[in-house]
Image (cartoon, rainbow, N blue to C red):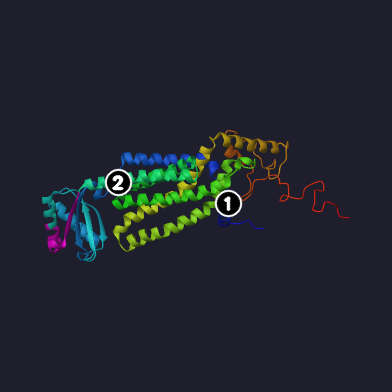
Amino acid sequence: MAQNGLASRLYNGEAGLNIVGRRKLWFGVAGVLVLIAILSFSIRGFSLGIEFAGGNSFQVPASVGTLDDAEREVNSALAAENTGIEVVTAQKVGGPGGDSYELRTGQLSAEQATAVKAQIAEDLGINEDQISNNQVSEAWGSQVTERAVLGLVIFIALVMVYLILRFEWRMAVAAVASLIMNLILTAGIYSLVGFEVTPSTIIGFLTILGFALYDVVVVFDKVQENTRGITANNNQTYGEAANLAINQSLMRSLNTSVVALLPVGGLLFIGAGLLGAGTLKDLGLVLFVGMAVAFLTSILVATPLLALLKNYDPRIQAHNKRVLTRRGAIARGEVTGKGAASPAQADATVEPLDPDAAALAGAAPKVGARPAGKRPTGARGGRPGGGGNRPGGAKRR
């Protein structure tokens, strides 16, 4: 029979991807990326929008020409007034009076702003009242940042309480660590590429936290299902059960991420790119980047970190040791057992200090396999031995 393709095996949770067993690789890659992001924060910084850095914005009607024409004329007016400032960003926006171009510059004094406005009107051949001039103080951006940080702290605290009540404290720590890494990596991309940070960006950052949390909870719910009562049998380690949960929920997480990214991609590439709706760009960009990163961190960071934390639990340590000891005995032919790894499948070179890698390198239970146990006796487990007591007492002839 032909072997099923990867897509089919992913859908059935039978891909057998060793995510938890390679956690050192994922942690190493994540650590390098976080270090790069932090260095970018320190050296390059962020490209702050007018709301955070302060500055002026000029709006001119779109009837003056293309966006490039408007930007060129505004730069010419700024140079004519010897301001030493240029246009920082330019975008097309819609309004009750029709489409217009919004061009943002650095901070200008009131006199400079008035002179530049007059020069722009003269160069474009329009009346001054057709040009809107607004000045934004950086203090407003500071207030937005403070409120966003406060909202982030409250959100993380509520998430911790919910996950502790719903699962356990180790799952809460792993989930929050994944959320924080998601924010750091997304912010690092913004810093490296030079995307402009606006209030819409901050709103998007807070929005992707909910999506990232959903991804983590989906996987953790399956982990909890697979590991319930795991110490009652010697068939698989905690890391194997967690890795099985990832394989079983991977396709669901992938489908959810793709379905979520499609409308966001439409918002970003069609709305902002093709239609020129610049106001959608900031929100769509952070959502697209953050959701893509959230999928990766929920799979490659959250669950492997949970398995690492659980391996410090004395009960799980003892259980993992029993599983590996039993497999070693079976591989040497000392004992036999139902559902155990065959000697050919066992890996004798596995380091005992890494039970998850040892178990995964050997013969882990098949996907969907249930812990093997003794069949119960009694009325529901089979007929009692020795003839038993049947109603009526006497044996039929």
Q: For the point 39% across and 54% down, which residue is it?
A: 288
Residue 224 place in picture, x, y as percent: 54, 46
Q: Would you place residue 65 above or below residue 50 in this image?
A: below
Q: Which amino acid does label 1 sit on?
A: Ala
Could you tell me which secondary element the residue under label 1 belongs to? loop
Q: How crowded is mark 2: few (under 14 residues within 10 Å), some or many (20 or more)?
A: few
Residue 126 lies in the magenta stretch: yes
Foreground of the two, 160 or 58: 160
List the residue tagged with mark 1.
15
Quarter the N terminus occupies: bottom right
Residue 260 visible in the current orientation: yes
Foreground of the two, 235 or 269: 235
- Disc number for residue 147: 2
Taking the view exactly as shown, the residue that stands out farthest to the right is 397
Could you tell me which secondary element the residue under label 2 belongs to? helix
Label 2 to label 1, Cα distance in Å? 44 Å
Circle nearer the N terminus (2, 1): 1
Residue 354 visible in the current orientation: no
Q: Would you place residue 32 above or below residue 9 in this image?
A: above
Question: Mark 1 and mark 2 in contact (Cβ < 8 Å)?
Answer: no
Residue 275 lies in the magenta stretch: no
Q: Which amino acid does label 2 sit on?
A: Arg
Q: What stretch is highlighted in magenta?
A: 118-136
Quarter the C terminus occupies: bottom right
Residue 323 place in picture, x, y as percent: 64, 38
